[in-house]
Image (cartoon, rainbow, N blue to C red):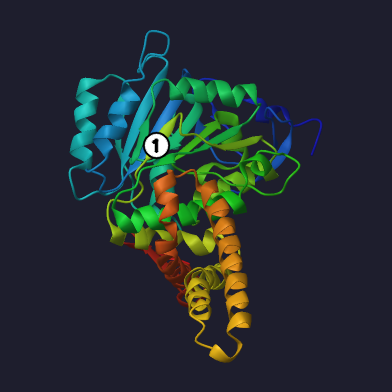
Amino acid sequence: MQKDGPEENGAEGPGRYTPVLGLTGETGTQVAVPGRWGWAVGAVYDQPEPEELVELTVIVPARNEEDCLEACLQSLVSQSEDIFELGRDWELVVVDDHSNDRTAKIAREFVAQSSGVTVLAAGKLEKGWTGKASAIWTAARKARGRWLLFTDADTVHEAGDLRRAIHEASRHKAGMLSYSPRQIVSGLAQRTLMPLVFCELALAYPPAKVSDPNQRIAAANGQFLLVEREAYRRIGGHASVAGDVLEDVRLAFLAKRRKVGLRFRYADDAVSTRMYRSTAAMIEGWTKNLALLFDNALALAVWRALDILLLAGLPVLAFELWNARFAVHSIEWLGAGWVLALLWVRTLVRFYARVAKSNFPVLDCAIAPLGLPMFVVLLYRSWFQHRILKRVSWKGREYAG
């Protein structure tokens, strides 16, 4: 780090070009770049500064989201009010990522109804980029907001959550704020599997540790990711995670590394989402993500398989012993049955204590053991796709694992 920097790097202002950290320009020249957190060395990327900044830019990447986009956009535009007016104080940008359904049409209907809404077409997907990162980057380079909110098309936002999020990030001096939304599920497969996944996430990425600048652990949820404009530049924007399938978590790691301030929490008071609308989509989605979210998905699969064995096998064995089928020492076998029964109760209590951390309703947590076989299969499937085949698919595209 340097205390002073060259004079030419301070050329910020309307219509001028601002050096951006972490991105690669044509020359790749290394220079000292001024910013809120002091001088730092980075590669130059020429990005035009808008004539006038607004408070917030909301960016919604959308690929074949006709089932959910309308509800998402309605929940966003309805937050326009006199003191926070859409088109004057903030803007909403929808990026159509080469959809072949009614996604673009739905987005354009909101353009006609509300000022401040813009629809952009994602550019050609370049090699080394994921579709989501490319779509977001298309809009981020044109964003006029002091804050940038990246949110998925399957989210629904509570009234006032945009202003409250900005206030929360400012109050906690966080350059990046991410919410884990309330998950909406339907069908037996989702209601049994999703609590298992999210309890493991809560254990692997405790929000208190993620938000602690002295802890190395980092996480974010791309369904709601609010970043201050200068912080976004400091971490290099989505160009710095162009090829990352799990771009949100990677951005969080960069935020901690660049010390821009990271805050992460469960926020059922702010936003909800229905991640998957079919079992097939859920299988594809978690196959893409599980091996990246957990350091050793294969080991986790073994542990959860052991849960199946203990939860299902211990009561059966205890029942056999209670029936005293080993008649020669029936009293001893009866005592052993009670030991196994107590061991099963202990296993059950520990299991539900873990699943309760998922923040799912009590009934969904209660039936979660039924999802253990699918969870084990998906952990193995994700590990195999990433570590052996080294490729994953999502929404009709294949990416390197």
Badge 1 amino acid = Ser
Residue at 54% across / 89% down in the picture? 327
**Would residue 22 be visible to someone looking at this image?**
no
Question: Where does the image place residue 395, in percent across and percent down from the top left?
Answer: 31, 57
Question: Where does the image place residue 288, in percent across and percent down from the top left?
Answer: 43, 62
The part of the image, by quadrant, that contains residue 285 is bottom left
Question: Where does the image place residue 289, in percent across and percent down from the top left?
Answer: 47, 59
Please, is residue 319 above or below residue 43 in the view?
A: below
Residue at 30% across / 49% down in the picture? 186
Q: In the figure, is residue 390 to the left or right of 260? A: left
* Callout 1 secondary element: strand
Near-viewer residue (390 or 274): 274
The part of the image, by quadrant, that contains residue 37 is top right
Near-viewer residue (272 or 72): 272
Near-viewer residue (182 or 192): 192
Please, is residue 183 above or below residue 335 in the view?
A: above
Tag 1 residue: 272
Q: Residue furthest top?
A: 82
**Would residue 332 be visible to someone looking at this image?**
yes
Question: Where does the image place residue 308, in percent across and percent down from the top left?
Answer: 49, 70
Which quarter of the figure is the N terminus placed in? top right
Mark 1 nearby-residue class (10 Å; few <14, some 14–19, many ≥20) = many
The part of the image, by quadrant, that contains residue 284 is bottom left
Q: In the figure, is residue 347 to the left or right of 312? A: right
